[in-house]
């Protein structure tokens, strides 16, 4: 047998070996995807970090309610509205809150910001390795750079609380620099553009420093908008895939860098952190194929075709619509839409934004027509985040890395919690084997 045929042969055998009848999941009461029959997540742990609320449990079942997101018990909407009133950056404050469980006072926050700025520069070897190894996917470069940080850490395997906090702050500080450098090197090696390595500045927020390292020039409104996007995506409870990945790996007591790299790998998936890229591509497509951006009939006709897998990519999905927990509304999407108007005016994107808002409205209605009203759906954070990144002038290649830049705060907070609560145990779920035993056949008789 030719060796080139072996891969095909193995693949064909695996096709049958991987087949499991759907009725077996019901027979053995298996929660596919860790989901209950009503679509809610299987309860696997307790946390004091984030709380995602999208429904209430009643005797009749699940009752949809407007979505709420809490950071350490504080309503995210209250945090965001306070930042807007005071016209200041808030990502560092949210990072302090999520890591410690307490809101900082001015002195504590200033010291924390200074610590962040001190840790933003990369080790020279890390910078050179990003340049030398290049790469076409920023998430892969980010994961590789995180694993490399293990080498430069004097106590990489120490899981004491003090050391975990030190490592967490260094990761939060270095993510913006790694992502900015990785993109500029990608831009140079793939697109032949000039190579810019701009070092982070003292006395700038994370959002400001990131925009400076990425493109040098930015407006104050762009920086404030990016800061708010980071605040909105810093944490989302322990049940999302990447945070759960970090908690599962942390429960084994592996090192911080291995655990965070695993979280990056999870977030990279198009069904998780890559969803906003799908949304932006779909929006560009709809801008081209729909001739009248105000015509509800034309919009509905095309969206229904998409849901029937007759248009766009044939997936049957309207990207940015629907969420595992939120029903009536995703509070992050509500806040983004509320905050985007000022930036829309600055960039002259009023027509595009009005079209996006109409698409949101019609997509929800079309979903009801096609799928029925059994499950209420809403737009999620991805519906608006990619559009806002575009207005800020950020390239699509870093949309998912930006998600990681925000979520590293939640990941590290959950890792610290996973390794420090009294009832901790290694996370080890069970799988039911549904294959009968067979007798071994000697190789000469096969």
Image: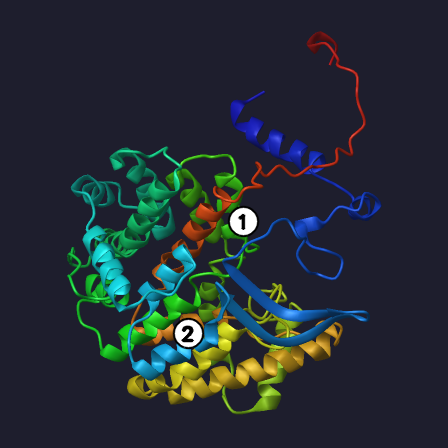
Q: Which mark is residue 244?
A: 1
Q: Secondary structure at mark 2?
A: helix
Task: Tell me how far mark 1 sits from mark 2, CA to CA.
Answer: 25 Å
Does residue 288 appear anywhere in the picture? no
Task: Examine the rendered structure and indicate whether residue 156 appears above or below residue 361.
Answer: above
Q: Secondary structure at mark 1?
A: helix
Observer-nearest residue: 401 or 193?
Answer: 401
Mark toward the viewer: 1 or 2 = 2
Which of the two labelled residues, at mark 1 and mark 2, occupies the earlier sequence position?
A: 2
Residue at x-position 30% and y-position 33%: 155
Name the residue furthest bottom.
294
Residue 187 percent across, percent down from the top left: 25, 57
Which image quadrant for residue 346? bottom left
Residue at x-position 18% and y-position 72%: 217
> Which residue is identified by label 2?
79
The image's colouring method is rainbow
Residue at x-position 48% and y-position 48%: 417
Task: Examine the rendered structure and indicate whether residue 142 appears above or below residue 279.
Answer: above
Quick check: 315 left or right of 253?
right
């Amino acid at each position: 047998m030719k060796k080139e045929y072996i891969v095909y042969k193995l693949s064909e055998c695996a096709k049958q070996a991987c087949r499991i009848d759907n009725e077996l999941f019901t027979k053995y009461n298996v929660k596919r995807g860790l989901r209950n029959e009503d679509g809610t997540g299987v309860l696997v742990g307790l946390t004091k970090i984030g709380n995602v609320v999208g429904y209430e449990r009643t005797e009749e079942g699940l009752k949809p309610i407007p979505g709420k997101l809490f950071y350490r018990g504080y309503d995210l909407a209250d945090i965001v509205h306070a930042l807007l009133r005071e016209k200041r950056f808030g990502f560092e404050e949210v990072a302090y809150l999520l890591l410690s469980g307490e809101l900082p006072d001015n002195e504590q926050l200033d010291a924390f910001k200074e610590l962040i700025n001190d840790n933003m520069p990369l080790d020279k070897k890390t910078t050179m390795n990003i340049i030398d190894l290049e790469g076409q996917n920023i998430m892969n470069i980010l994961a590789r750079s995180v694993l490399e940080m293990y080498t430069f850490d004097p106590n990489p395997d120490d899981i004491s609380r003090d050391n975990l906090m030190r490592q967490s702050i260094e990761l939060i500080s270095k993510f913006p620099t790694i992502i900015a450098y990785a993109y500029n090197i990608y831009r140079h090696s793939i697109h032949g553009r000039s190579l810019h390595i701009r070092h982070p500045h003292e006395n700038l927020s994370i959002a400001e420093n990131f925009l400076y390292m990425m493109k040098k020039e930015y407006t104050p409104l762009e920086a404030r908008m990016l800061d708010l996007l980071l605040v909105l995506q810093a944490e989302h409870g322990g049940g999302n895939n990447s945070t759960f990945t970090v908690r599962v790996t942390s429960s084994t007591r592996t090192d911080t860098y291995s655990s965070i790299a695993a979280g990056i790998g999870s977030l990279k998936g198009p069904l998780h952190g890559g969803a906003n890229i799908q949304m932006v591509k779909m929006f560009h497509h709809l801008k081209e194929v729909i001739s009248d951006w105000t015509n509800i009939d034309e919009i509905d006709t095309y969206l229904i075709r998409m849901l029937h897998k007759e248009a766009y990519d044939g997936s049957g999905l309207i990207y940015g619509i629907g969420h595992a927990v939120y029903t009536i509304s995703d509070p992050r999407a509500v806040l983004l839409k509320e905050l985007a108007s000022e930036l829309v005016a600055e960039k002259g994107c009023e027509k595009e934004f009005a079209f996006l808002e109409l698409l949101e409205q019609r997509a929800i209605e079309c979903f009801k027509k096609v799928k029925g009203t059994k499950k209420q759906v809403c737009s999620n954070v991805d519906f608006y985040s990619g559009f806002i990144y575009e207005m800020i002038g950020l390239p699509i290649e870093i949309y998912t890395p930006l998600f990681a830049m925000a979520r590293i705060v939640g990941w590290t907070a959950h890792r610290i919690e996973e390794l420090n609560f009294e009832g901790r145990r290694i996370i080890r779920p069970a799988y039911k084997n549904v294959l009968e035993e067979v007798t071994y056949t000697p190789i000469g008789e096969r």
